[in-house]
Structure formats: structure tokens, C-alpha cells
Amino acid sequence: MFLFPALFVLGLTVFWPALQAFYLSLFSYDLLQPPQWIGFKNFQRLWSDEVFWKTLQNTFIYIIFVVPILAIFPLGLAILVNQKIWGIRWFRTAYYVPVVISMVVAGLAWKWLYSETGLLNQLLQYSLSFVLPDSKLPTIPWLTSPNLALFSVMAVTIWKGLGYYMVIYLAGLQSIPAELYEAASLEGSEGWRKHWDITLPLMRPYIVLVAVISAISATKVFEEVYIMTQGGPLNSSKTIVYYLYEQAFQNLEIGYACTIGLILFLIVLGLSILRLFFTQFTSSDTPTL
């Protein structure tokens, strides 16, 4: 009975729409005509859709490059800002500021930085002018090159997520008793060695949590792509969520978009099950205090 209100709200807002999406994936539906039953033809179309496989590839590339960085670098930042020195709260705030900035604002700002006349290209040209003073240096097409567009968008995701995951690690670091580090010092473990011996083993559940959360977030990335590249050039930065949006709201192919959404649901479900598995594994394997 206590769970009923929450389950009722979840049923209306999550479970029922999910069942409707699966139901509509079996129809041809474009909002302009009544749904027409086509069975599994949407899945057959998805199987032969080269753009879908390209977006799926881009999504997994996003995960492969973004997740390790967001699992490692924020831990280093958390260790640095966990020190008891003057002004450390200012650094914590500075690292967390990108998290509270709207993605629309961040995307537009980075789009300006990446432009041909933007700050990044100007700084590169100014730096290289000392090495090659008499030559005209070309600008780097950060967002217009098929080889660079996806990685340029990844940089914005990493920049915006560092502070968020740093706070998660910081909470874990502050739960470790200081006596363990004092005992390690008596045993000769100093500097970064004590973090290898104490911090990493005890932070393993947090590392798994951050890795899985960042993987799910990378799977569902949309705003950066929409604001900065619109999936281009040549679908090189188009992710599976952006492709779903494109099919549903630009092409009005709701049934096909629901089919793509079902694949996305299965991917996120797999990552969530992986998180539960690794959480149980790390909790049983982590040494007790």
C-alpha cells in the first residue's frame, strides 16, 4: 500500500507509455493517418537501415571514449579538492559550475569556440605563427569534419560531466576514515601510494556506479548533438537518440521511431543489469572498514 502511489505514477508516466511504444512499433503511424498494422516490418527495416547502424556505431564510440575519462579524471579531481587547504571550496565550486550551466548555453558557447573564427582556432593560429611565421595556417574544422565532429561533441559532454561525477567521488572519499591513511603512513605508504593502497579499493563501488551512470548518459546523449552539429556532417555525429528524434518529429514516422526506442530501451536495460551485477560484486569484494 505504501508503494501504490509511486507505482501508480510510474505506471501512468513510464510503464504505460513504454507498452504503447512497443505496440506502435508494430504499426505504420505518421500522426496524419490512422495506424496500420504491419507486424515486424519496422524491425526488418531497422535491420537494413544503414543510418541506424551508423548511429548505433557512433553511440558505442561515444561510450568507449567518454566513459573511461569520466570514470578516471573526476576521481583525480575529487582527490585534489578533498585536501584541507585554504580556498579549496572555491576550486570545488569552479569545477562544479559547468554542471549547473544549461546545455543550450554550453552548446552554443562551445559551437562558437569551435567555429572557424572561434577562440580555439585563433589560439592555434597564434601559437603556430611563432613556428611558421610566413605561412598561412588553415583552420581546423572541428564541427564540419566527419573525422572530428563526434569527438568535438564528446569534449563538451566530458567538460560538463566532470564536476558532477567529482561530487559523487568526493562523497565517497569523505566517508573513508582518516585513521586508515594515518595507519598507512606508519607502514610507509605516502603520496599517491596511499591512494593506490586505500582509496582505490574502497572507492571501487563508486567507480562502478560512475562508469555505468556515465555509460547510460552517453547512450542517451541528445542536446549536444542537436545544438552543435544536427547529426552531421554525413551522419558522423548522429547518435541513436537524435535519430529517434529525427524519425519521430521531423519525418513523423512514429511507428519506426518507437522501434528505435525499443532498441534504445534494451541497451539501457542491459547497462542497468550490468550495474546491478557489478554493484553486488564490488560490495561483496570491497574490504570492510
Image: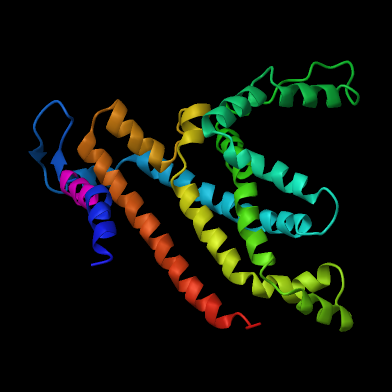
Q: Position of residue 62 (x, y in %)?
A: 53, 47
**Apparent side of residue 209 relative to residue 26 in the rendered image (left or right):** right
On the question of residue 235 being in view, the answer is yes
Identity of the residue drawn at 53% across and 82% down: 284
Question: Toward the viewer: 180 or 19?
Answer: 180
**Apparent side of residue 166 relative to residue 15 in the rendered image (left or right):** right
Q: Quick check: is 17 in the magenta stretch?
A: yes
Quarter of the image where one finds residue 132? top right
**Apparent side of residue 16 relative to residue 112 in the rendered image (left or right):** left
Q: Position of residue 260 (x, y in %)?
A: 30, 44
Can you say which quadrant of the picture contains the C terminus? bottom right
Q: Position of residue 17 (x, y in %)?
A: 22, 47
Q: How many marks?
A: 0
Question: Toward the viewer: 90 or 154?
Answer: 90
Question: Toward the viewer: 39 or 217?
Answer: 217
**Apparent side of residue 150 relative to residue 183 in the rendered image (left or right):** left
Question: Toward the viewer: 168 or 125?
Answer: 168
Q: In the image as oriented, which residue stretches furthest toward the front?
A: 2
In the image, is residue 178 above or below residue 240? Answer: below
Identity of the residue drawn at 87% across and 78% down: 185
Q: Which residues are magenta?
A: 15-24
Identity of the residue drawn at 50% across and 72% down: 279
Quarter of the image where one finds residue 8? bottom left
Identity of the residue drawn at 24% across and 50% down: 18
